[in-house]
Image (cartoon, coloured by chain):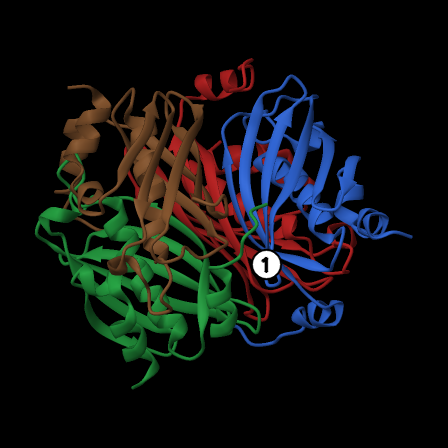
Chain colours: A brown, B green, C blue, D red
Amino acid sequence: MGRIEEIWNGDRLIGDFGMKLLEARDGYARVSVKVEERFLNAHNIGHGVLLFAVADAAFALSVNAVTDAVGVQWSLNVMRAAKPGEEVIGESRVFHKGRQSMVCELTVTAGDGRVLARGLSTALPVSRQAYAESASTKKAT
Amino acid sequence: MGRIEEIWNGDRLIGDFGMKLLEARDGYARVSVKVEERFLNAHNIGHGVLLFAVADAAFALSVNAVTDAVGVQWSLNVMRAAKPGEEVIGESRVFHKGRQSMVCELTVTAGDGRVLARGLSTALPVSRQAYAESASTKKAT
Amino acid sequence: MGRIEEIWNGDRLIGDFGMKLLEARDGYARVSVKVEERFLNAHNIGHGVLLFAVADAAFALSVNAVTDAVGVQWSLNVMRAAKPGEEVIGESRVFHKGRQSMVCELTVTAGDGRVLARGLSTALPVSRQAYAESASTKKAT
Amino acid sequence: MGRIEEIWNGDRLIGDFGMKLLEARDGYARVSVKVEERFLNAHNIGHGVLLFAVADAAFALSVNAVTDAVGVQWSLNVMRAAKPGEEVIGESRVFHKGRQSMVCELTVTAGDGRVLARGLSTALPVSRQAYAESASTKKAT
């Protein structure tokens, strides 16, 4: 099984949200999700978490296509609301791939072309061993 | 029904995630969520989206306690992984409440005190009418 | 005197840094600055503040070309170092112009095409009166 | 000469801005700067670049007190304007010190206690050799 499939199938949240994989290759990924009833906020529009989630799924695929990496920073501007029932598309493009970090451009658009959100995110390459251990670090600073 | 209850009960994603309201008052809120199986990523740890979601729920409560406001910007640093099965707590504190914008400090901690993530977020006061209409804006730029 | 000239001539820091205006129109601006000796950090490369400054100057021009606006949020990723003596170019493109906020894409490049930094920034429209008064607000929260 | 002195004396921009070192130790630093005429923007208030600069100087000291590190990401919210002639103080506190990254909390206050800006910043540990070489990387992606 390839790296993309491993991430896609192993990620339980992606599955639970019912996301669809539109495209994924080294340094680029595009994912869609439907604004279902369960993803609405108190104002009856698509939740900000949904926009973050679809961008983050694309981010994970785009950086993990080549090496194990973990996201450490996200900056997201949300400009427009997602409508109930529509499909929204998250897109991530790696524009910096250094030895120590990768930086991505994130875009969330609706089917009719409205740009709903844009962001930047940073990932660090990491060994799977180190990543698993990070969950058992005891001490907070 | 008070403003806090209105947000809490009306937000479908908060309900779907099984979040618990720990505290909410003007300018401050604290929410928890359990790292269920469905919230794990491909590395078998809590998904970054879950950390964002619990911080965002606290954010929404803290800013909407007094006036209708919509989140427009999030900056989030994730430092540690959430373990399967544990409870994580999202906390938002409004530290700037201006006429044009509100700015919050976000913190996500695990039950044992590990700080998992920290962030800043910005909300703009908005009329409900304007907010609903933003979902029907046609043109992307 | 036009709005662009007013900002450009009135901004003392832009003048002090010796920036050059390459292009400025509604929603877009491009500015350059030389990595002089006084802009080097302890590692003998261009200071991060210089990259921020040239991006911020472009940001101010791009949003103030049409209306008075004040920057409230900046997210900046720096990927590469600026070399002593080279010219670096800051560019800002407004990609969201709402009634309540404007959001820009910032890019800093070197003369040879290396992308040094990228960012997003948010501005709020503001009356000049309100802006001047914000400097005299007494109370911190 | 200690690490703090090396950064402080070697950083030409810190010197050019006339900053004062108030405190610097492992994981914490505080720096001040005066809002001189040359740091005013077109609205006659302290430039956003000045607020960024004083926070960034504290950031550099706080992370470089122990190891060589380079800043890669800054998120900054500016809430209030700095008045001509007043002193502003930049403060950085490292709240995460991992093997792969350090994350800091940044605060900019005025002498009368007004909080002008808050931010988060991320640094990566780096060898001086690698850092110097980054300035000569040719290819942009």
Residue D27 in sight in this render:
no
The chain letter for the residue carrying disc 1 is C
Percent position of residue B119, x then y: 38, 54
Type of the residue with mark 1: Ser
Kindly identify the residue that appears in the image at 30 percent across and 52 percent down: B52
Vertical order, C92 against C126 (above or below): above
Q: Residues within 10 Å of mark 1 (few under 14, many from 20)?
A: many
In the rendered structure, the answer to whether residue A139 lies left or right of residue A51 reads left
Percent position of residue C52, x then y: 61, 40
Vertical order, C99 against B35 (above or below): below
Percent position of residue D37, x then y: 78, 54
Q: Nearer the viewer, residue A17 or A141?
A: A17
The secondary structure type at the circle numbered 1 is loop
Residue B22 in sight in this render:
yes
Kindly identify the residue that appears in the image at 83 percent across and 53 percent down: C3
Percent position of residue C6, x then y: 84, 52
Kindly identify the residue that appears in the image at 10 percent across and 54 percent down: B86
Specify the quadrant of the image occupied by residue A73. Answer: top left
